[in-house]
Image: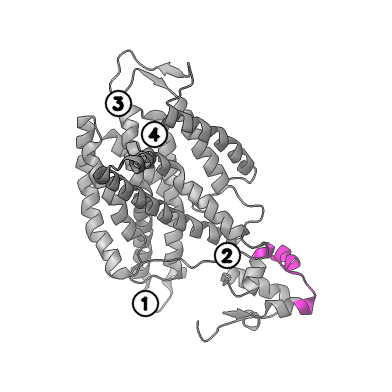
Amino acid sequence: MIFVKFILLLVYQTLHVMKSKFLLPNYLRPIGWMLIIPGFILGYLNVFQSYEIAGFGLQLREKGTLFTPAFENFTNELALTLVIAGLLFIAFARLKREDELTANLRLNALYWAVLVNYALYGVFLLLAIFNDIAKTNELFNVIDWLTGNLKFMIYNLFMPLVLFIARFNYLLHKSKTEYQVKPLRVLPYKPYNIIGKVLGIPLAILSIPLLVESLGNYLGINIDRVFYVLPFIMLVWVYSREKHEDEYINHIRLEAMQVAVYGNYIILLLSNWFLFNIAFLLTLIFNLVTIPLIFIIVFRYRLYKLNKQESKFGTSNLNLGIL
Amino acid sequence: MKNTLRVERAIKDMTQADLAEQIGVSRQTINTIESNKYVPSTVLALKIARVFEKPVEEIFSLEDSD
């Protein structure tokens, strides 16, 4: 429960403090590149070769449990921090010349990157299911190496940022003389927005007791199944038009996505350093839905505020808003 | 929406870079607007109009498809 409270508090903070126009200073971009290279190498060695930096750990307590280990080596924490911080620096450092169009492209690329990330997740999931059923020898080994052991959850930690950086740079630099302006593709309101809402809310609520239960079981097994499907349903909601979607709502949509991505990585970096073992594994699972979840909360909250404004002033012909 | 940015620049003998510098955007942004691929915000349109000392409607106008 402390974990849930902690997340809620962070989301709340994100809502109020984070401004989507927040960007990092320009000089952090080259520093970001310097961080991700050792980060990815260390991460690869740690995940695929079980390498740990000798002596880079702490005796945290005398007796450990699955949630609170006695001894923790910080190699994986260091690798993830280098990768995430580096990618954030590259992704969100101010350009030399920022203007409204580059800001627009950034938001667009972010929206695209999150969608493609989940499309990749879908492919991984299908491969993993195929893997389970078919178990063909040679192919099996390759697929198993790619998808086995829930590896997507590890890719999912950095993939949205990598995709974003690639897309944003493509939009900026494909042509020397002009930027690439791409329309935002959103599903129609009917039936997608309704399907997303009707299925998404109960499923999200259902997953909370499962999360708690699996905490009790010390294993993330039960929760997995819901969490495999939940992101897609939420995504349908995130990527479908509102009933009366106009330019302004469209803008709120894009800004909410940026806040969601920032919030997602703040949660990730914090839990990386404060949660270990199974608790961190649960964070990895939870991380599959944090972006759409925060997006929906922020987007809905801002739409709610907008509606409240309208109902206050909308019925009168006098513009009371200026008084 | 279409615009006469290119013509107005020619009259004032300005390059895209000059205009970009004056209103604080990048050169690529000016080019993207000129080729009708990006519709600027009202603020940006007003800034452009101020540089050319003309009302906005003389530089930007709606098309039938808008």
Report the residue at 49% width, 39% height from top: A84
What x and y, as percent, mark residue A202?
20, 53
Subunit bearing disc 1: A
Circle 2/circle 3 CB separation < 8 Å: no
Helix, strand or loop at label 4? It is: helix
Residue type marked 4: Ser
Circle 4/circle 1 CB separation < 8 Å: no
Q: Are marks 1 and 3 on the same chain?
A: yes
Circle 1/circle 2 CB separation < 8 Å: no
Report the residue at 73% width, 79% height from top: B8
**Magenta span:** B10-28
Distance (Cα) linking label 2 and label 3: 48 Å
Subunit bearing disc 4: A
The residue under label 1 is: A316
The residue under label 4 is: A271
What x and y, as percent, mark residue B43?
60, 69
The residue under label 3 is: A67
Q: Are marks 4 and 2 on the same chain?
A: yes
Q: Quadrant of residue A200?
A: bottom left
Q: Residue A180: which numbered mark, if any? A: 2
Distance (Cα) linking label 1 and label 3: 58 Å
Q: Nearer the viewer, mark 4 or mark 2?
A: 2
Subunit bearing disc 2: A
What x and y, as percent, mark residue A6?
34, 37
